[in-house]
Amino acid sequence: MKILGINFTKLNAEKFSTDTKGIKIGTHIDLSEIREVKADFFSSKEKVLGIKFSYEIDYDPNFAKIKLAGNILVSTDETKFNQILEGWKEKNLPDDFRLSIFNLILKKSSLKALQLEEELNIPLHISMPFLKPQDPKQPQDYSKTE
């Protein structure tokens, strides 16, 4: 499977309150459509799938909400293509395909959501790395390990 492209069609972020006490953050990914895409500019012998997705972050109770939606284009061989479309009819996608698509959505959407959260001064939905002061009782080790 090759990712041909991903784009957003909806970016919505709303902040309803300034009280951050007791906030619980939940995320939700949904695939709303998987279909064959036919276009003359794809000269490959592989088949192309168009996937519509949405990604939501809810800050409960009623603090904020972020909604993103978009499209993904992927190409795959004919066997996998047919397997995915058949599975989609029953909402039962192959695990390797589903995980790859969900990880792509998480990666792209989380980056966009972080930008929106920063703009609206909303708590980040994922933990960012940070440095802590070193314990003065611990000796510093500047050696490199390989």
Image: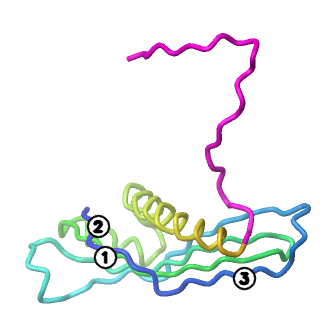
Disc 1 + disc 2, Cβ < 8 Å: yes
- Amino acid type of disc 1? Leu
Disc 1 versus disc 2: distance between alpha carbons? 6 Å
Give the mark nearest the N terminus, 2 or 3: 2
Task: Tell me the SS state at disc 3.
Answer: strand
- The residue positioned 29% from the left and 67% from the top of the image is 3
Which quadrant: the N terminus? bottom left
Q: Residues within 10 Å of mark 3 (few under 14, many from 20)?
A: some
Disc 3 versus disc 1: distance between alpha carbons? 28 Å
Residue 5 colored in magenta in the image = no
Residue 22, given in percent of the width and then of the height, sits at: 90, 61
Give the mark nearest the N terminus, 3 or 1: 3
Residue 96, given in percent of the width and then of the height, sits at: 38, 55
Task: Tell me the SS state at disc 2.
Answer: strand
**Above-or-below relation of 9 to 117:** below
- Amino acid type of disc 2? Ile
- The residue positioned 18% from the left and 70% from the top of the image is 78
Task: Tell me the SS state at disc 1.
Answer: strand
Q: Residues within 10 Å of mark 1 (few under 14, many from 20)?
A: some
What range is drawn magenta here?
121-146
Mark 1 lies on residue: 73
Q: Main secondary structure of the magenta part?
A: loop
Q: Which mark is residue 3?
A: 2
Q: Residues within 10 Å of mark 2 (few under 14, many from 20)?
A: some
Q: Which mark is residue 14?
A: 3
**Above-or-below relation of 39 to 107:** below
Disc 2 versus disc 3: distance between alpha carbons? 30 Å
| Front-lying residue, 72 or 136 | 136
Give the mark nearest the N terminus, 1 or 2: 2
Q: Is residue 92 left or right of residue 121?
A: left
Query: Toward which corner of the image does residue 80 lie, by quadrant?
Result: bottom left
Which quadrant: the C terminus? top left
